[in-house]
Image (cartoon, grey):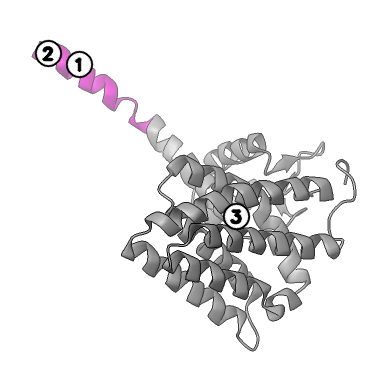
Amino acid sequence: MRLVSGMRSVTALADLPQLERQTLSGTAYAALSDLLASGRLAPGERLSLRQSAAAFGVSVMPVREAVSRLVADGVLEVSPARVIRVPMMSQDAFRALAETRIAVEGIAAARTALRHSAEDLSAIRNAEAAFRSEAEATQPDRARAIQLNRDLHFAIYDACGLAPLREIIARLWLKAGPVINLDLRAHPERLRQGFALRRHAEALAAIEARDAPAAERAIAADIREAAEFILARGGLQDHSGGD
């Protein structure tokens, strides 16, 4: 029996190189996902497999596998000329995405208000303060503000206690992030107007008070007002297909 057990161990060890490759692919997927969700890639922006691989310090193969997964997720696309890029988004698709986010992220915020720990609340407070400090700066770094906005939202969602819900939200942000990036970089006045600052403060206050309906309303208003601003600026396609 010991011999059989030893043989099984050797067989298992033989699979480790494949596991390592899959781990690199997963790391590349996570890195590209973070670029999308945090708004560091814009709609229409192209991706180079070789440049991405060099930036991540890996070979091209795991990056290609990660890109294939993101294409399957619908958050990257490959043109007929084999160019990899972030898709453009139609107005109708963006409205549907915003309404879905309002419903799903509102649930997460409400749950966080009811069940957050002291550690969760500290993380949310710190994230809110970091965004506020950047947004109120004389010359805010818009790219950093976009990432800090994402960090605050996910500090809230991380505390909701439902891993599948958090995963759904993360997938929605893969599509939302690039549009937020495009909007804030083209229209810095949205930071100065302070809509997000007010809604973030309301969400924090509601979570502190364990007021679930108020937390849900604050997050819903934050998403809705940002979506209305983006749609009003006309930066999206006016139909569901084409470039």
User: Is residue 84 or residue 89 the one in the foreground?
Assistant: 89
Specify the label residue 37 is tagged with.
3
Of label 1 and label 3, which has the lower sequence position?
A: 1
Q: Nearer the viewer, mark 1 or mark 3?
A: 3
Cβ–Cβ below 8 Å for labels 2 and 1? yes
* Callout 3: SS: helix
The percent coordinates of residue 98 (x first, y second) are 70, 51
Cα gap from disc 3 to disc 2, whole angstroms: 50 Å
Kind of residue indicated by mark 3: Ala
Q: Is residue 26 visible?
A: yes
Task: Give residue 61's quadrant in the image.
Answer: top right
Q: Residue at x 53, y 44 (%)?
A: 29
Kind of residue indicated by mark 2: Leu
Task: Give residue 120's quadrant in the image.
Answer: bottom left
Of label 3 and label 2, which has the lower sequence position?
A: 2
Disc 3 crowd rating (10 Å Cα; few below 14, some 14-19, many 20+) is: many
- Quarter placement of the N terminus: top left
Residue 13 highlighted magenta (yes or no): yes
Kind of residue indicated by mark 1: Met
Task: Report the residue that reaches farthest toward the bottom.
Answer: 138
Q: Is residue 37 left or right of residue 190?
A: left
Magenta region, main secondary structure: helix
Cα gap from disc 1 to disc 3, whole angstroms: 45 Å
Disc 2 crowd rating (10 Å Cα; few below 14, some 14-19, many 20+) is: few
The percent coordinates of residue 224 (x first, y second) are 71, 59
User: Is residue 215 or residue 39 the one in the foreground?
Assistant: 215
User: Is residue 213 or residue 116 the one in the foreground?
Assistant: 213
Residue hosting label 1: 7
Relative height, residue 233 to residue 112 (above, below): below
Which stretch appears magenta? 1-17
Q: Residue at x 61, y 51 (%)?
A: 173
Relative height, residue 79 to residue 32 (above, below): above
